Image (cartoon, rainbow, N blue to C red):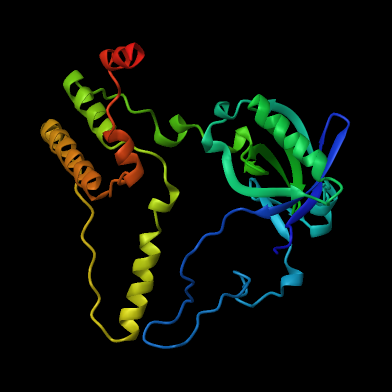
Amino acid sequence: MARPIWTGAITFGLVSVPVGMYSATHEHEVSFHQYEKGTSDRIRYQRVNERTGKEVDYADIVKGTDTGGGKLVMLEQEELDSVAPGRSKSLDLHAFVDLEEIDPIFYQKSYYLAPGSDESAKTYALLRDAMAKVGRAAIGTLVMRGKEYLAAIRPDGKLLVLETMFFADEVREPEDELGGLPSATAKPAEMKMAVQLIESMSGKWKPKDYRDSYTDRVQKLIAEKKKGKEVTVAEPAPEATDVTDLMEALRASVDRAKTRRGAAAKSTPTKKKSTAAKKTTAKKTPTKKTTAKKKAA
């Protein structure tokens, strides 16, 4: 069993629920080192004084910020610790909101919350089930690893799931980043065809249908190079669709989507009815005349 990365208590009103926090996700990627080209010599990074060129010990490094006009403000770690939040043990809930109201752009990372002890399991279940009944998510704050986090907590089956979130001032405004928002509009015919394409490609969300194929290809590349094989070059990315060919591209996409869906339906085995079911189906329902004759007899 994994160890919790944070332990504390959810507090709402005068109720306190001890919990432990566990990572709900992990990323899979190939780990690389850096080497000098043509050699097996590892590349190492050093902390070097840019003026003297000499290496500096980590203990002799302080943090600083340029306040403008060539003026610097230097801060010792003790000074930063004096104003940073300490290791909090409280996850304070401030409000309960509809989950649909939260824009996914605010989400950072997912964690599982578990009861902190057997004694707290009942209170944990009460909070979980009450939130599920009213269809609400809890918004709260907690301090972890010297940083304060905004968090959303939602019920998920037998568990509570916590999502760390960005604060509002950490989410960039799209107009500032893009220099303006797209203003182009589609023609009615193009819109109709695009909607038809979306409908033809619609289906249920099945997470297991998707896999990190890039990491798979990197692993395959490493295996091939290890055996001295030639590397297979991937196909180039498709070029942007010309606006003059947009309708034709949409129409062809709809046809391809329908063909694929039809092929998938044919490949899906249909369930055969049991022998008993067939016999039951084969029996004819007695007609009114037959029933009348039986009564007369």
Measured from the top left, where is residue 164 in percent x and y? 64, 43
In this figure, what is the number of numbered marks?
0
Tell me if residue 174 comes above or below residue 67 in the rendering.
Answer: above
How far from the left and from the top, in percent, is residue 283? 29, 32
x, y (%) of residue 27? 52, 60
Q: Does residue 216 appear to the left or right of 55 in the view shown?
A: left
Left or right of 77, for residue 28: left
Q: Front-most of 138 and 234?
A: 138
Location of the C terminus (image quadrant)? top left
Q: Residue at x 86, y 34 (%)?
A: 15
Classify 233 as above or below 186.
below
* Observer-nearest of 154 and 166: 154
Q: Nearer the viewer, residue 29 or 14?
A: 14
Q: Quadrant of residue 128?
A: top right
In the rendered image, is residue 274 in sight? no
Quadrant containing the N terminus is bottom right
Q: Position of residue 239 (x, y in %)?
A: 19, 47
Instruction: Answer with the quarter of the image where residue 171 lies.
Output: top right
Whether residue 166 can be seen here = yes
